[in-house]
DNA sequence: TGACAGATGCAAATGGTTCGCAATAGCATC
DNA sequence: GATGCTATTGCGAACCATTTGCATCTGTCA
């Protein structure tokens, strides 16, 4: 089974387990999310969904995104361009570098940084629930 | 001269140097910003400004904030609560830990993390222009 | 197949922020 | 200190991403 199909299945199970109806628009949106490998915003997801089924509405895209986010199935990011961007939450945690010139989003992960963050929070008497590390950068010339 | 006064002076010089008029509303807003030690949003700054001079408008608060941000005199943050928050840019760079229960913002700085970030970017062929590190955390029980 | 609660599309509302515009007020000059 | 030009102001309307109310549809399970 392809990764895309696996992701779709995971979404489907998630909703089913929560007793949430698997409607036609939701199926379409799940499919779109499962096959996304970038960090699309709601508009982009809506466009991809409409390409599959023209009757899907932007409202339902937003409602489904919220639903999946609440269940932890997808993650919402707020990069500096205003719109919220989404990606599915499988795979290991990573942070992002945003190319200021192209808008390209590059993923990276540093265990050292993750560890240091936890240490800092601990010293302050806190446990990190989630965090955000975004590097806005320009290609070295 | 107090830190507050120093900050106000720096703001004043910045604007003067750029040939920007030092109007009454701007003076009030500069004063408010200079004396802020937290991370207030536009509404909060507006409230503080109005307490000094009731004729100041929210529009002018926003316009002045943009002006100062463009000159690098203040910094804009976008924590997860939607509104933009501001703080003056003197002092050394730091990042933020946000207490999810109280909303309290705690500042910290880790040279190690700063260094690691630069290394990661360099490996990817990038120079960091700015970055955002926010830890959303809960007090350890 | 029927019933009913949950889900949908549409349009209108929201909330933070920006903008257009006519009126006002810095500031350089006299 | 008065004058003139222009930047700046307050106000309300516009913006834009996202959310919501509502009448209508549709999964789901009996
Ligand atoms: Mn990612
Ligand atoms: Mn700070
Ligand atoms: Zn991370
Ligand atoms: Zn930092």
Image (spheres, coloured by chain):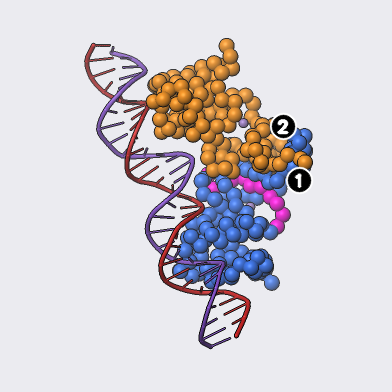
Chain colours: A orange, B blue, C red, D purple
- The answer to whether one can see residue B37 in this image is no
> Which residue is at a point 55% across and 22% down the rendered structure image?
A35
Residue A111: assigned label: 2
Q: Magenta residues, as a range?
A: B91-103
In the rendering, at what x and y percent does residue A56 appear? 41, 27
Q: Which chain carries label 2?
A: A
Q: In this view, does A38 lie above or below D16?
A: above
In the rendering, at what x and y percent does residue A51 appear? 47, 24
- Give the residue pinned by disc 1: B111
> In the figure, is residue D6 to the left or right of B57?
right
> Which residue is at a point 53% across and 34% down the rendered structure image?
A41
Q: Which of B141 and A61 is in front in this view?
A: A61
- The answer to whether one can see residue A105 in this image is yes
Quadrant in the picture for residue A25: top left
Mark 2 near ligand 3 (CB under 8 Å)? no
The local crowd at label 2, few if under 14, some if 14 to 19, many if 20 or more residues have their Cα within 10 Å, is few
* Count of numbered marks: 2
> Which residue is at a point 73% across and 39% down the rendered structure image?
A139
Secondary structure beneath label 2: helix
Quadrant in the picture for residue B54: bottom left
Q: Quadrant of the N terminus of chain A?
A: top right
> Which residue is at a point 55% across and 56% down the rendered structure image?
B40
Badge 2 and badge 1 in a common chain:
no
Is residue B100 a member of the stretch shown in magenta? yes
Q: Is the magenta stretch mostly helix, strand or loop?
A: loop
Dots 2, 1 in contact, CB < 8 A = no
Secondary structure beneath label 1: helix
The answer for how far apart the CA atoms under marks 2 and 1 are is 16 Å
């Amino acid at each position: 089974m392809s990764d895309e199909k696996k992701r779709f299945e995971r979404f489907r199970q998630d909703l089913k387990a929560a007793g949430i109806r698997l409607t036609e628009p939701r199926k379409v949106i799940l499919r779109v999310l499962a096959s996304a490998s970038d960090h699309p915003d709601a508009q982009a997801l809506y466009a991809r969904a409409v390409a599959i089924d023209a009757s899907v509405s932007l409202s339902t895209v937003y409602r489904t995104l919220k639903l999946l986010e609440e269940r932890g199935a997808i993650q919402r990011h707020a990069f500096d361009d205003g719109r919220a961007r989404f990606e599915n939450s499988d795979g290991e945690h990573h942070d992002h570098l945003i190319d200021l010139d192209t808008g390209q989003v590059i993923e990276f992960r540093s265990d050292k940084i993750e560890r240091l963050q936890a240490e800092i929070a601990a010293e302050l008497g806190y446990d990190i629930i989630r965090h955000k590390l975004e590097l806005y950068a320009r290609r070295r010339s």
